[in-house]
Image: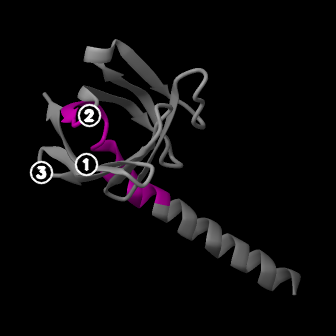
């Protein structure tokens, strides 16, 4: 029984490492500076400096017209203006300290998706990668 369990754990570990290595090239395409406009909030900029192995992003999100910059962290922190962003395959999901969630799909030259806040606000958003 011990050998069977050890063998299963070894196989699962190998699959997990293979999956992480396979997902990494796609996730790295999110690294960079992205600009867009969010109806109701104004111009926005997302700067992704890194994508961690677990998919969590590092960087910041800025709303220049409001003079607000929100860093990305391990969890949403409203009091300290911390957003939480995670990449899964070709989708970046951002939970914001301002309230609401972005779901952005990686598309040719940009990200496209929606911003939802509560049950009353759901707007399409597009961000272009700045070269």
Q: Residue at x 44, y 56 (%)?
A: 21
User: Disc 2 vs disc 1: Cβ atoms closer than 8 Å?
Assistant: yes
Does 35 lie within the magenta span?
yes
Relative to residue 79, is residue 110 drawn left or right?
left
Q: Earlier in the sequence, mark 2 or mark 1?
A: 2
Say which of 115 and 85 sits in front: 115
Q: Residues within 10 Å of mark 1 (few under 14, many from 20)?
A: some
Work out whether residue 3 or residue 119 is closer to the camera in this orientation and state it: 119
User: Which residue lies under the disc numbered 3?
Assistant: 108
Q: Which residues are magenta?
A: 20-39
- Which residue is more in the foreground, 32 or 79? 79
Q: Position of residue 50 (x, y in %)?
A: 41, 33
Q: Earlier in the sequence, mark 3 or mark 2?
A: 2
Q: Which mark is residue 40?
A: 2
The quarter of the rendered structure image containing the C terminus is: top left
Whether residue 25 can be seen here = no
């Amino acid at each position: 029984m011990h050998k069977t369990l050890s063998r299963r754990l070894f196989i699962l570990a190998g699959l997990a490492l293979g999956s992480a290595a396979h997902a990494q090239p796609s996730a790295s395409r999110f690294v960079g500076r992205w600009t867009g406009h969010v109806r109701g909030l104004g111009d926005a900029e997302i700067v992704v400096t890194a994508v961690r192995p677990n998919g969590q992003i590092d960087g910041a999100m800025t709303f220049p017209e409001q003079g607000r910059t929100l860093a990305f962290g391990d969890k949403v922190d409203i009091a300290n203006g911390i957003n939480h962003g995670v990449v899964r395959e070709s989708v970046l999901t951002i939970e914001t300290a301002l309230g609401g969630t972005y779901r952005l799909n990686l598309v040719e030259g940009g990200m496209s998706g929606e911003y939802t806040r509560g049950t009353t606000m759901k707007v399409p958003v597009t961000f272009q990668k700045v070269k």
